[in-house]
Structure formats: C-alpha cells, structure tokens
Image: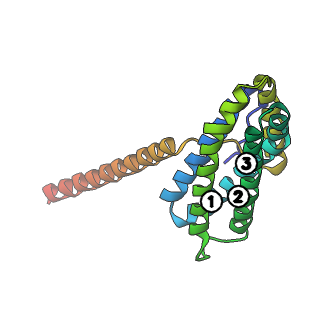
C-alpha cells in the first residue's frame, strides 16, 4: 500500500489553538484505538502515538511556549508555560520507555495507558487554562498557526511519519463494514453450495 504523505501546511488550520486542539483530538483517537486493538496492532499504534506526541511537543516548545512567555505579563500565566514544559519532560520519559519496549513486555500496555492518562491531564490544563490565556494576549495566533503547521509537517516528513489516521470511529465503522461484507460473501457461497447439492440430489 502506498505510504501516506503528510498534509501540506496550507491544508492545516491556520489558527494556532485550532491546530494544537486538532493534534489533541488525533492523539486521543489513537489512544482509543490502542485500547480496542488486537495485540499485533498495538505496536504500530503505540509507535504512532509516540511519534505524534514527539512532534507536537517539539513545535510547542520551539514556537508556542517562548512566544507565550514573552506575551504573558502575569506571573501566574507564565507559570502555566513552565508547568506545561515540565509535563512535556515527563511525557518524553514515558515515550522513551514505550519505544524501548515490545508488546511482549509485561508493562507495555500499562505504560501506554499511563501515558494516555498523563496526556489527558496535560491537554485539559492547556485547553482550559493556557489556551484561553493566550487568546487574551496580542499574539497573532493565525500567523503562529502558520508557523506551527509548517514546522509540524516538516518534522513529520523528516521523521517519515505518515499523515493522520482517520478517527477511531471511522476505523471501527470500516472494520464493521468489512466484516459484514465478508459474512455476506460466506453466506452467499454457502447458499450457492447448498443449491448445487440440492440440484444434484434432484437429478439422482
């Protein structure tokens, strides 16, 4: 199957917050897929989760956080950036552990789940506290969104990371459709075989 290529930066949301929230939803969908996946699928999903989080953290640390620190005048708001950076460091430690594991390791699934819970907490704080504070500043979030998108897709291309997978619901629907088609095909073959047997019995 042909390898998917990252979307162009021009295809991404131009607002910085919209782009970052889209990343959050993509990773949440991947964690959902991991929970429902068979063991042989979990390795690929874990790799993708780690790759997407690594890129997301890097663009925030390179572009978003320095700009936020400059724009914020309140010490409490600056602390939000420092806390987010510390949380990134912990997430990176978990990512490194997962990347060094295989699905056969006892702690593999548990470590991915811990990363999931940690990321959920980080996302909640960003979306409920950091992002609203950013909206109150004079930062040009559209201009920043363009820079974030450009850097994101450059990193994805550099690391050989394919474009976003469809959300879990779409994948489940596709699997269900595929299973239903296969079931119908089996039933049709069984019906055809039964008809042939009946024909032969009638001739005897």
Q: Quick check: 124 left or right of 179?
A: right
Q: Which mark is residue 84?
A: 3
Q: Quick check: 24 left or right of 153?
A: left
Foreground tag (3 vs 2): 3
Of the 4 image quadrants, the one containing the C terminus is: bottom left
The residue under label 1 is 115
Q: Is residue 36 visible from the viewing direction of this image?
A: yes
Q: Residue at x 85, y 42 (%)?
A: 62
Upstream in the sequence, badge 3 or badge 2? 3
* Secondary structure of the residue carrying numbered label 1: helix
Instruction: Sort mark 3 into few (<14), some (14-19) or many (20+) by Cα contacts within 10 Å.
Output: some
Label 1, label 3: how many angstroms apart (C-alpha)? 15 Å
Upstream in the sequence, badge 1 or badge 2? 2
**Count of labels in the image:** 3
Label 1, label 2: how many angstroms apart (C-alpha)? 7 Å
The residue under label 2 is 91
Instruction: Sort mark 2 into few (<14), some (14-19) or many (20+) by Cα contacts within 10 Å.
Output: many
Does the CB distance between marks 3 and 2 fall below 8 Å? no
Label 3, label 2: how many angstroms apart (C-alpha)? 10 Å
Upstream in the sequence, badge 1 or badge 3? 3
Tell me where residue 123 appears, x and y as whole percent.
63, 45
Q: Residue at x 58, y 50 (%)?
A: 120
Q: What colouring does the structure picture have?
A: rainbow
Does the CB distance between marks 1 and 2 fall below 8 Å? yes
Q: Residue at x 83, y 38 (%)?
A: 69
Foreground tag (1 vs 3): 3
């Amino acid at each position: 199957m042909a390898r998917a290529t990252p979307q162009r930066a021009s295809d991404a949301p131009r607002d910085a917050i919209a782009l970052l929230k889209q990343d959050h939803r993509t990773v949440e969908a991947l964690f959902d897929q991991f929970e429902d996946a068979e063991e042989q699928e979990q390795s690929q999903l874990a790799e993708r989760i780690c790759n997407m989080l690594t890129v997301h953290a890097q663009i925030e640390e390179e572009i978003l956080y320095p700009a936020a620190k400059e724009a914020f005048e309140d010490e409490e708001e600056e602390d939000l950036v420092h806390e987010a950076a510390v949380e990134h460091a912990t997430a990176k430690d978990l990512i490194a552990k997962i990347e060094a594991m295989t699905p056969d390791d006892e702690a593999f699934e548990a470590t991915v789940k811990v990363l999931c819970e940690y990321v959920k907490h980080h996302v909640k704080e960003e979306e409920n506290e950091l992002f609203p504070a950013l909206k109150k500043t004079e930062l040009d979030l559209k201009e920043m969104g363009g820079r974030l998108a450009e850097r994101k897709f450059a990193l994805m291309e550099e690391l050989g990371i394919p474009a976003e997978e469809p959300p879990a619901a779409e994948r489940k629907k596709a699997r269900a459709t595929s299973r239903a088609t296969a079931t119908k095909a089996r039933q049709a073959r069984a019906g055809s075989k039964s008809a042939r047997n009946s024909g032969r019995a009638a001739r005897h």
